[in-house]
């Protein structure tokens, strides 16, 4: 029963096995999945409560003047849900090799004849499932608690924006993953990157508040388009290019470029590490 | 050469940064392997011995594709380690990281099935294989407990089982009996012998000399990145004439050891602890003709001699002769 | 210790930069989020303008400072115990003659010093970004900060006691507690934003008075501040919290320790 040659079927089986392994692992941390839902709601509640307290009864009106909608609850919840998706992508993909190293299984992974892209694919699948579950549950439950209707607007279109945004986000995470394995201060770097991207994508405010240069930089990040697309679909806000299909086209362009770029940079960084220090030194 | 493993003039250098104080640092080069050439024959158990930092792990990592060499070439099961990496990986079963190479939140069974997937076994084959391995390594009863609840010895057994998942013709085992109790270590060695009897080739690293002597067909001794000796156990022992090794038991202070080392023709003098006090092992180049000088040097420096025993050359003697230290010392220093 | 921190700073520059950057970004995100509720977003006051009453930035930043200290203390002490459990070194720690308490305190002291520096730097950055922060009554503010820190020490020890008992669940519990405190102690918004039910619970938590007194004092008691009780009452509560909680926390910790030694659970995780 020596290892057989890889086929597409066996590689896809590895993707599923890898996702299943991560799901089994997280299910054995008691309460973690509950926290995944609870934390985004609490996070969104902070600016909501701050805004209500400082603006009083004019909160909705002021917010509408600044953003285009008075439904600040849904606005913040969407931002928080988008933040969840971005955070998980970073911690699961950019941090993936570091996680394997901390677990002690990195070398075991590299000893197998499976190309890392399939295992990374399984990790990405796991990350997708977990983040979509958490983000959706947080949005629905948060809406219920804070008294708004989560199904206003184009839910289908919002979901399309999310799915379109996932691929470039994972590509971006892989790109950052290359930086992580080179620089090695993984925790610090990922914390900084996730907050940096979250700031740029305007999770709690419109990026129109940025000065022009910062706004231009923000538009280079796929999560910015995804977040605005979801908000516009659900809350009737304006798309960056006025029409939903134009914003979606931009996301799809990112979806083509970002994963390829991320993969190329990542494999180059990986090879350079193997050449000098070896896999165990990630 | 037509071995299962062929290594030709393999070298590996690392660039490391050394720091001095707050802001100063400089790069230096470490030569982990220097022009190693060897061959592992099909169906043999090949021992790899050497002190810490000798280059054994570097060699193993290159052979298993975890590390890229700086120069030289190597083939494993006929596949080139750089140009045919995936074929090399598919044809080797490895136990390199001990208990660390397992997912602690998964059960023993889940670990084996997951790694089976990584070796492209079908779901049915992985389940079957995991079942067989769990029975073989006697972990069937705890197979469905998470690995974090296993003892150290059980984790090592599971790690060994993981190396068998792809039923590879070549096994690389790095100190597989580490942390195992005596009965478990004995069971594992029996499994290794079974696998050997089935025709598998095994590269085996150990710090336990008796294990290497009883298990290995041939042994390579590596130190400072260089291959110092290679041959069967008998060939290596024969390379040291019996009367080149003398053992002295007694109370032997440090100044006595230093005095012995200054004697002409003394190649190595190593003091270790014994039940009755100290044991001084001396390797010389002229047999036992220098015995009177030796006794004089010891007694004049305060040593008390209880027994002089020119004994049969052991693998440990060969190791000491080649590297200047014992493996036991080296293990204690870890 | 200073030399060790300097060495770490130089050898791990990303860690150093990320610590500051992260805080700045978090506060910026929350502050900008709060500003979307402002009536005059198109004509904001110029940078350096005097703060308005109940300046939301002051509410956010001073609350954030206390949150950081609480979070670091909770994690450093509680998680430290957990980490030793997982590594298997907790038993070894107990085999040594060194005082475990002293060891924990010294580690926390290091962290608190570092957190203090970080919060100062982050505050400085925020001042550059959104205008002058009110810093009135600095000595009373410092006193309240020290008392609050002492109290959070005690909470940290109580949490360490919990970790010895419930082991892995403690990690999830730590996360949960942080966020519960975040809401109930109104670190990032005024207490007036809380629904009445939650406000009643907040009033039962001494840390709420720490947050309220600390930021009200530094903002020089704008109208409506402090929100929970008169400042004199809050100072008394915070003082009692700062003196009493460390003793209570340590007592709970020693009880949990003794229980673990009696039941043989020091080595299990």
Image: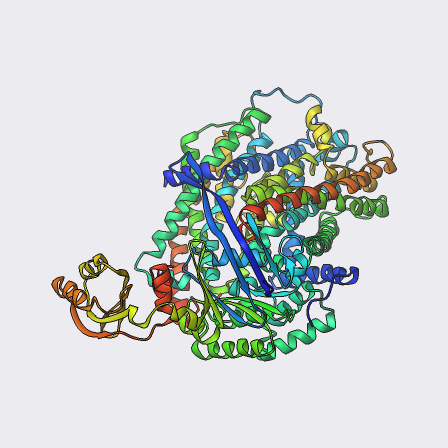
Image x and y of residue C231, in percent: 47, 37
Give left or right: position of A89 versus A252. Answer: left
Does residue B154 lie above or below C221 as drawn? Answer: below
Q: Is B242 or B25 nearer to us in this picture?
A: B242
Q: Is C174 or B220 nearer to us in this picture?
A: B220
Does residue A63 lie above or below A78 as drawn? Answer: above
Give the number of callouts: 0
Image x and y of residue A100, in percent: 59, 55
The residue positioned 21% from the left and 66% from the top of the image is B290
The residue positioned 51% from the left and 42% from the top of the image is C68
Report which quarter residue B234 is drawn in.
bottom left
Image x and y of residue B129, in percent: 67, 74
The residue positioned 48% from the left and 70% from the top of the image is B218
Quarter in which the C terminus of chain B is drawn: bottom left
Report which quarter residue B221 is drawn in.
bottom left
Does residue B138 lie above or below B178 as drawn? Answer: below
Q: Is A238 or B210 nearer to us in this picture?
A: B210
Report which quarter residue B271 is drawn in.
bottom left
Image x and y of residue A64, in percent: 77, 32
Give left or right: position of C164 versus A183. Answer: left
Quarter in which the N terminus of chain B is drawn: bottom right
Q: Is C262 or A171 nearer to us in this picture?
A: A171
């Amino acid at each position: 029963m020596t290892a057989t040659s890889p086929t597409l079927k066996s590689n896809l089986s590895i993707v599923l096995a890898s996702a299943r392994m991560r799901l089994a692992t997280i299910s054995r941390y008691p309460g973690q999945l509950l926290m995944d839902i609870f934390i985004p709601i609490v996070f969104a509640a902070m600016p909501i409560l701050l805004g209500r307290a400082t603006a009083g009864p004019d909160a909705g009106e002021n917010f509408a003047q600044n953003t285009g909608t008075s439904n600040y609850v849904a606005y913040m919840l969407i931002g928080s849900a988008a933040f969840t998706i971005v955070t998980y992508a970073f911690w699961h993909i950019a941090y993936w090799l570091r996680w394997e190293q901390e677990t002690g299984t990195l070398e075991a992974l590299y000893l197998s004849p499976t190309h890392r892209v399939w295992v990374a694919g399984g990790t990405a699948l796991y990350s997708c499932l977990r983040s979509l579950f958490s983000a959706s549950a947080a949005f629905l439950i948060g809406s219920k608690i804070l008294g708004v209707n989560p199904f206003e607007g184009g839910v289908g279109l919002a979901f399309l924006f999310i799915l379109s945004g996932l691929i470039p986000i994972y590509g971006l995470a892989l790109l950052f993953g290359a930086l992580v394995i080179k620089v090695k201060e993984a925790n610090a770097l990922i914390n900084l990157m996730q907050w940096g991207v979250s700031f740029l994508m305007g999770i709690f405010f419109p990026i129109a508040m940025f000065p022009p240069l910062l706004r231009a930089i923000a538009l280079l990040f796929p999560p910015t388009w995804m977040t605005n697309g979801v908000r516009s679909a659900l809350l009737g806000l304006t798309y960056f290019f006025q029409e939903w299909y134009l914003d979606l086209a931009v996301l799809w362009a990112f979806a083509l470029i970002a994963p390829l770029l991320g993969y190329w940079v990542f494999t180059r960084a990986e090879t350079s590490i193997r050449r000098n220090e070896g896999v165990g030194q990630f | 050469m037509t071995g299962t493993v062929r290594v030709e003039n393999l070298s590996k250098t690392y660039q490391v940064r050394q720091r001095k104080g707050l802001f100063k640092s400089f790069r230096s080069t470490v030569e982990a392997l220097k022009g190693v050439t060897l061959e592992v024959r099909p169906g043999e158990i090949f021992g790899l011995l050497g002190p810490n930092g000798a280059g054994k792990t570097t060699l193993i990592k290159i052979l298993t594709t975890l590390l890229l060499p700086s120069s030289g070439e190597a083939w494993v099961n006929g596949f080139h380690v750089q140009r045919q990496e995936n074929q090399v990986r598919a044809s080797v079963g490895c136990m390199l990281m001990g208990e660390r190479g397992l997912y602690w939140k998964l059960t023993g069974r889940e670990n084996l099935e997951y790694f089976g997937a990584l070796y492209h076994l079908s779901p049915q084959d992985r389940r079957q294989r995991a079942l067989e391995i769990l029975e073989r390594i006697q972990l069937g009863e705890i197979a469905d407990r998470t690995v974090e609840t296993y003892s150290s010895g059980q984790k090592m057994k599971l790690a060994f089982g993981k190396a068998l998942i792809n039923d590879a013709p070549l096994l690389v085992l790095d100190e597989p009996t580490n942390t195992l109790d005596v009965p478990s270590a004995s069971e594992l060695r029996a499994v290794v012998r079974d696998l050997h009897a089935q025709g598998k080739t095994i590269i085996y690293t150990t710090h336990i000399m008796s294990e290497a002597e009883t298990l290995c067909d041939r042994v390579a001794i590596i130190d400072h990145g260089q291959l110092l000796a290679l041959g069967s156990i008998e060939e290596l022992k024969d390379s040291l004439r019996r009367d080149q090794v003398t053992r002295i038991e007694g109370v032997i202070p440090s100044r006595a050891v230093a005095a012995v080392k200054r004697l002409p023709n003394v190649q190595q003098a190593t003091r270790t602890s014994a039940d009755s006090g100290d044991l001084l092992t001396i390797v010389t180049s002229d047999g036992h003709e220098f015995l009177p000088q030796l006794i004089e040097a010891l007694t004049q420096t305060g040593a008390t001699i209880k027994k002089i025993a020119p004994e049969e050359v052991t693998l440990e003697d060969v190791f000491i002769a080649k590297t200047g230290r014992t493996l036991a010392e080296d293990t204690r220093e870890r | 210790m200073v030399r060790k921190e300097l060495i770490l700073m130089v050898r791990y520059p990303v860690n150093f930069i990320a610590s500051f950057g992260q805080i700045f970004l978090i506060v910026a995100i929350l502050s900008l989020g709060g500003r979307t509720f402002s009536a005059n977003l198109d004509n904001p006051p110029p940078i350096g303008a005097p703060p308005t009453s109940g300046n939301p930035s002051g509410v956010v930043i001073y609350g954030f400072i206390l949150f950081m200290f609480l979070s670091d203390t909770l994690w450093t002490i509680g998680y430290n115990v957990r980490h030793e459990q997982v590594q298997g070194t907790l038993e070894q720690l107990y085999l040594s003659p060194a005082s475990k308490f002293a060891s924990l305190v010294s580690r926390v002291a290091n962290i608190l010093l570092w957190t203090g520096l970080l919060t100062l730097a982050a505050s400085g950055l925020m001042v550059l970004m959104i205008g002058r922060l009110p810093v009135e009554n600095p000595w009373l503010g410092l006193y309240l900060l020290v008392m609050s820190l002492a109290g959070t020490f005690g909470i940290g020890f109580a949490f360490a006691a919990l970790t010895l008992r419930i082991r892995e669940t403690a990690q999830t519990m730590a996360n949960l507690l942080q966020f519960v405190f975040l809401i109930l102690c109104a670190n990032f918004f005024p207490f007036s934003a809380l629904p009445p039910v939650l406000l009643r619970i907040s009033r039962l938590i001494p840390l709420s008075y720490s947050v309220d007194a600390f930021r009200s004092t530094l903002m020089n008691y704008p109208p409506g501040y402090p929100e929970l009780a008169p400042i004199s009452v809050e100072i008394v509560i915070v003082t009692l919290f700062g003196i009493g909680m460390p003793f209570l926390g340590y007592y709970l910790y020693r009880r949990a320790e003794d229980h673990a030694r009696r039941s043989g659970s020091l080595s299990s995780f």
